[in-house]
Amino acid sequence: MQPEQPSGDAAQPDADAPADGAGVPADDTRAAMPRRVADQTDAMVDREALAQLFAAADSGDVPASGGSTAGGVRSSSGGSGSGHGQGHHRHHRRRKNRKRRALIWSLSILGVLIVIIGVGAVLGVTFVKQATSARDDLMAAKTQIAAVPALLEKGDVARLDQAAAQIKTHTDAAYKTVQGPLWDIAAKVPWVGKNVAAVQNTTVAAHILVDDALPQGIKVITGLQAKNLKLKGGGINLKPFEAANKALPGIADAFHRASAKVSGIELDGLLSPIRDAIGGMVSVIDENTPTVENAQRVLPVVLPMLGSDGARHYLLVFQNNAEIRATGGNPASSAEVKVDHGKVTLVDQASSETFYQAGTVRHTYTKLPKNMLKIYPQDTPWYSQNYSRTPNFPTTAKMFRDLWKATTDRPLDGVISVDPVVLSHLLKVTGPVSVDGDRLTAANVVKTVLSDAYARFPRGPDSDAYFAKVASAVFTKIAAGDWDPTAMIDAFVQSAKEQRVYLWFPKKTEQALAVQWNVDGQLPQNNTAGTQVGIFLNDYAVGKQEYWLSTKIDLTCNVSKRTVTTKISMKNRMPSSDFVDYVLGLRSPRFGRARTTMLLDVLYFAPPGAKAAPAKAAASSLIPSLARSGQEDGRNVTSVTVAVPKGQTETVSYTTALPERATAPLSVRYSPTATTTPVSIAENCAQLVH
């Protein structure tokens, strides 16, 4: 197509202007333009809006549109004007005509470029307006969303519904805006495109969540408020959980789709205003998608465990830290509870005395590997109070399951183990309980049960019975359901971190939850998820002295030798010898020790694939005849017995070469005492694990 020839004023330069653009300043585009074209350009280009659009890039390196236009004019006019100012030459009329045609062509092309630039500027202005509108809608939605947690806490359903409607209105508007063709075009523009795409995808993700997750989410969270979870007569109302279970697949699907929209966004590569604007929403999606998906997996398993499909029977085992064992203490008290559609009732209670009377002494009900039995005293499988000598809780649980079936002829659906420190955490949530005239609180229950009770009940069966009463009272308080669910969960989480609570279930799907929550007490058989050393204590003196025991654990590493040294410090804090006979060590005098001297089996479980190391300890503290070694669940084990006199501290350490495939993190499992056990792992140990 031939370019349209300019006519009228457009074809003639101003009388005062230099011919053919000669002498035009390099930065004055308008001086080289025909006046009508320049006027049309002014009408089409909103310079301020365009400047705002590019200013959003926060960079001085992005050229303004006028710069490129000026360069085009300079190139065109400069080329045509170079010979025109030399006057008429008798041999160059044809050359002059060619230059004139070139000028006409140049001006025509320039006009087309100006029109394109003008259209682009108009589109840019439109995009800026759309971006501003989307921003305003998203900010308004963000303001409403920020108010939701407080409304949920108050249970203000009416205002929650109102807020949800307003949030939806704003996100719908923002979603409609970013679906326009300008956003698709702008998302492909180099350098700025990823910022546009990030805003667009985040807006779409927010729209998905508000449309498909927020309404159901509000219903679920409102239903799960504490006041709705109490069951008349005691227990947990399962209906809100069942409603949540039905809603979770849709909510999880919405989060999954929203996550797919933002998964490709790299916040670090965005302009800071964009990053600040969308970062919060991206973080919410990234952090909550796994949580929602996990809840969708967990709740269908937990509901039957709470009796939604029929009654479940669990054995609660209470470990007594005053006579320490690998997983806490002597499990002298236990109770069977029934959970039926959330209602919890106490079925039966037992103690070591109960099993004595049932004729279980010196009988073994669970077959244990010979290599394992080499690690522990011979009487380990003969008495229920010794079942927790192994740190492998599934073994302890199976021993109790088999014992319970043999003595009651009732099967169990699971075994749960806690100690008095766990009871103290629970009493912080439920409030105090009364037992035989004693007011037991979070502050005094540990001392009352593990120390004071022995002065009051000097006979073992009597003190065990008192312990069982305390555990039953706390259980009854919990079963009443008059507590804050969030605070109760926090109490169990704290107990799990302190290695004081363990769960075992015969069904694989349910046991998988115990593993996921890290309360299964299973000894790791490989280093895939981390490298774990274990150092555990078992009372050998046969007494109730370890209420006064405090321990400290230190892990240090030699990087060049690839070794880890595990050291445990044990302090006997008994204040005097003035204790009833039942508290003092029965076996200590056999080895020439005072009855206030603690005798402790110190068991070291090497990491999977590592050899068991010999113990290092003061020779005067060791009882060589009681040293043992063997294997349990594929782990190499060494055990020594150490005497810790009243008022003194003894240490035992083991140094092991780590296997080549040891993986991070390096951790240690240990026996919880009546007090907190400080654990220290040297920083350079991180260099030994991958």
Image (cartoon, rainbow, N blue to C red):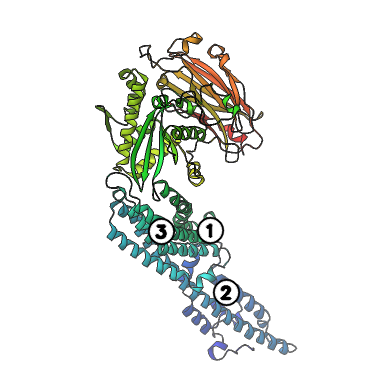
| Nearer-the-camera pick, 289 or 470 | 470
Nearer to us in this view, 146 or 99:
146
For the residue labelled by badge 3, is the local secondary structure a helix, a strand or a loop? helix
Q: SS class of the residue under badge 2?
A: helix
Task: Where is residue 523? Give x, y as percent.
Answer: 55, 34
On the image, numbered disc 2 is attached to which residue? Answer: 69
The answer to whether residue 133 is visible is: no
Q: Eyeballing the image, is 610 above or below 639?
A: below
Q: CA distance from mark 1 to mark 2?
A: 35 Å
**Which amino acid is tagged 1?**
Ile
Is residue 636 shown above or below 292?
above
Residue 247: assigned label? 3
Residue 265 numbered mark, or none: 1
Q: Are marks 1 and 2 in contact (CB under 8 Å)?
A: no
Q: Amino acid at mark 2?
A: Thr
Instruction: Tell me the crowding category of disc 3: few under 14, some 14 to 19, or many 20 or more residues within 10 angstroms, Cα based.
Output: some
Label whose residue precedes the other's in the sequence (1 or 2): 2
Left or right: where does residue 15 sit relative to residue 500? Answer: right
